[in-house]
Image (cartoon, rainbow, N blue to C red):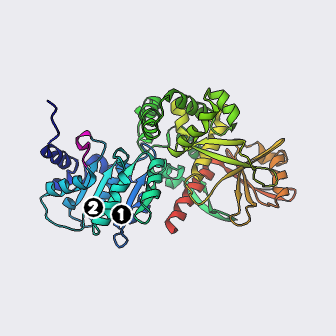
């Protein structure tokens, strides 16, 4: 005889998940963890109750979403909210299988022993495991108008699609990405090695940061490339000694073998895994559907769909191409693909050193990863016969190039700017006067013909982009 899970078992589980109802604080393990810099952006959305909206916290696996939710709970308790009025429920727990969100909310209120009707805070973690969650959440938001609902999930794409489709005017999305290099430095308590800033007029960047300890910053930049995408990894020597076991099995495999197949009905996970492995190994490379199909052994008919899925899961990012005149191509026959987090490559293969043959691609990947946090900016790259520029910004109105960046892990060009022929040609044709070129150690401006080239260490530039991105998000 098949037995059903009883109401009593459900309520006991809910009590177990909410220890602050008794203790008045979250568990020490979570309290001891450093808060991500993104916490200060997330927090106001949870406290906002004048506008009736649920908050949808989304992001890839292991970037700290659940920890951020616990930090939010502690913040609410310290601000004077009754701990018993803060409810946390992990949807993927099998105890809650087939129980509707509203029923779980009612069970939780019963478990607290309180009879208050209003001003509850309800958090549903891993919401993607509840079928048609967005429809049920919308009903909760409309029905319980004086309560605040927060949900989180790792299937970022599916969450965002569902949120946009069904939650228009009812949900506020918040994407928590992998760590920026700025956050890595902050979590490691290394802010003291970052020095002042210089003002330079370039769109999307106002302040450029440098360092008083460049060798140390470069060392941490390489560590960031190898391990830095995940808060838990940067503090664990044990995980860093075997990143493949942690990152590949706990993050990549769960996304490729479980999340994406279940969301999109993928039957042959071997093809998906082969494609992602090919992309990860060649992150920063230029692809066409033809050569990518050949390299990964995935049919072209399936390939584009899989690329969409991997991008939707926030594992990769496609970057489109323009020509030397800044014009876009009618057909996207060629494109670059970057990992959203460079440490994914290290986990799949092996950590790299500052002199590894692939270090240039991974530095480029790390720099692009900082820019990917800007939802208001789309990076491009320029490519033409015998020439390329790594990153280009286009003016929002004219769609003409308004700045150019060449990402190098070399000091060669600081002493020989005349070798930057492609960059010069592109700037000349598009009337750009002050491009940026990254280096390993050299910093300063060099005049070459009619260009004033700003050279910055790649590590300092990556920090700068992450720092400015966060500051702009705060002002927005």
Q: Quadrant of the N terminus?
A: top left
Q: Nearer the viewer, residue 454 or 173?
A: 173
Looking at the image, residue 317 lies above or below residue 448: above
Q: Which residue is mark 2?
A: 121
Q: Which mark is residue 71?
A: none
Extreme-front residue of the structure = 1
Q: Nearer the viewer, residue 235 or 303?
A: 303
Give residue 441's position: percent from left, percent from top: 67, 46
Q: Nearer the viewer, residue 360 or 371?
A: 371
Q: Which residue is mark 1?
A: 46
Looking at the image, residue 261 lies above or below residue 464: above
Give residue 372's position: percent from left, percent from top: 57, 51
- Residue in the picture at 27% in, 53% down: 101
Give residue 105's position: percent from left, percent from top: 23, 56
- Residue in the picture at 19% in, 54% down: 108
Q: Is residue 60 left or right of residue 437?
A: left
Marks 1 and 2 sit apart, C-alpha to C-alpha, by 9 Å
Is any atom of residue 214 visible in this view?
A: no
Looking at the image, residue 53 lies above or below residue 360: below
Looking at the image, residue 129 lies above or below residue 399: above
Q: Is residue 11 left or right of residue 140?
A: left
Q: Given contact means CB atoms under 8 Å apart, are the residues at marks 1 and 2 in contact?
A: yes
Q: Per the image, is 378 magenta?
A: no
Is any atom of residue 258 visible in this view?
A: yes
Task: Determine the secondary structure under disc 2.
Answer: strand
Image: magenta residue range: 94-99
Task: Determine the secondary structure under disc 1.
Answer: helix
Structural crowding at the residue carrying mark 2, measured as other residues with C-alpha within 10 Å and reported as few (<14), some (14–19) or many (≥20): many
């Amino acid at each position: 005889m098949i037995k059903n899970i009883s109401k009593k078992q459900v309520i006991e589980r809910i009590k177990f998940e909410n220890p602050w109802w008794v203790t008045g604080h979250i568990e020490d393990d979570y309290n001891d963890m450093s808060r991500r810099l993104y916490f200060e952006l997330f927090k106001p959305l949870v406290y906002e109750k004048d506008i009736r909206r649920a908050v949808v916290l989304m992001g890839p696996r292991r970037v700290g979403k659940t920890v951020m939710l616990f930090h939010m709970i502690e913040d609410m308790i310290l601000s004077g909210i009754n701990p018993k009025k803060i409810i946390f429920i992990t949807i993927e727990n099998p105890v809650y299988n087939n129980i509707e969100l509203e029923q779980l909310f009612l069970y939780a209120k019963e478990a607290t022993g309180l009879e208050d009707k209003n001003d509850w805070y309800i958090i549903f973690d891993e919401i993607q495991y509840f079928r048609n969650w967005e429809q049920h959440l919308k009903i909760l938001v409309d029905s319980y108008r004086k309560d605040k609902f927060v949900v989180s999930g790792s299937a970022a794409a599916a969450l965002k699609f569902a949120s946009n489709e069904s939650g228009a005017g009812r949900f506020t999305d918040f994407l928590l990405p992998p760590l920026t290099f700025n956050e890595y430095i902050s979590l490691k308590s290394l802010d003291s090695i970052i020095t002042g800033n210089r003002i330079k007029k370039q769109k999307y960047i106002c302040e450029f940061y440098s360092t008083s300890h460049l060798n140390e910053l470069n060392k941490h930049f390489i560590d960031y490339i190898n391990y830095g995408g995940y808060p838990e990894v940067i503090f664990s020597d044990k995980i860093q000694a075997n990143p493949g076991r942690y990152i590949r099995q706990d993050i990549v495999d769960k996304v490729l073998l479980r999340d994406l197949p279940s969301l999109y009905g993928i039957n042959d996970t071997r093809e998906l895994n082969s494609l992602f492995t090919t992309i990860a190994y060649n992150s920063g490379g230029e692809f066409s559907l033809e050569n990518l199909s050949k390299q990964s052994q995935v049919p072209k008919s399936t390939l584009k769909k899989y690329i969409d899925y991997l991008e939707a899961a926030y594992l990769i990012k496609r970057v489109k191409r323009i020509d030397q005149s800044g014009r876009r191509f009618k057909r996207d026959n060629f494109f670059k693909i970057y990992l959203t987090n460079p440490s994914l490559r290290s986990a799949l293969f092996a950590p790299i050193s500052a002199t590894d043959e692939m270090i240039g691609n991974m530095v480029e990947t790390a720099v692009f990863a900082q820019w990917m946090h800007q939802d208001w900016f789309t990076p491009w790259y320029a490519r033409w016969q015998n020439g390329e520029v790594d990153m280009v910004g286009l003016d929002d109105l004219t769609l003409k190039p308004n700045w150019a960046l060449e990402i190098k892990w070399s000091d060669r060009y600081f002493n020989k700017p005349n070798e930057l022929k492609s960059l010069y040609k592109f700037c000349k044709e598009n009337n750009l006067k002050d491009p940026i070129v990254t280096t390993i150690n050299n910093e300063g401006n060099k005049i070459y013909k009619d260009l004033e080239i700003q050279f910055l260490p790649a590590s300092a530039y990556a920090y700068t982009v992450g720092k400015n991105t966060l500051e702009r998000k705060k002002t927005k």
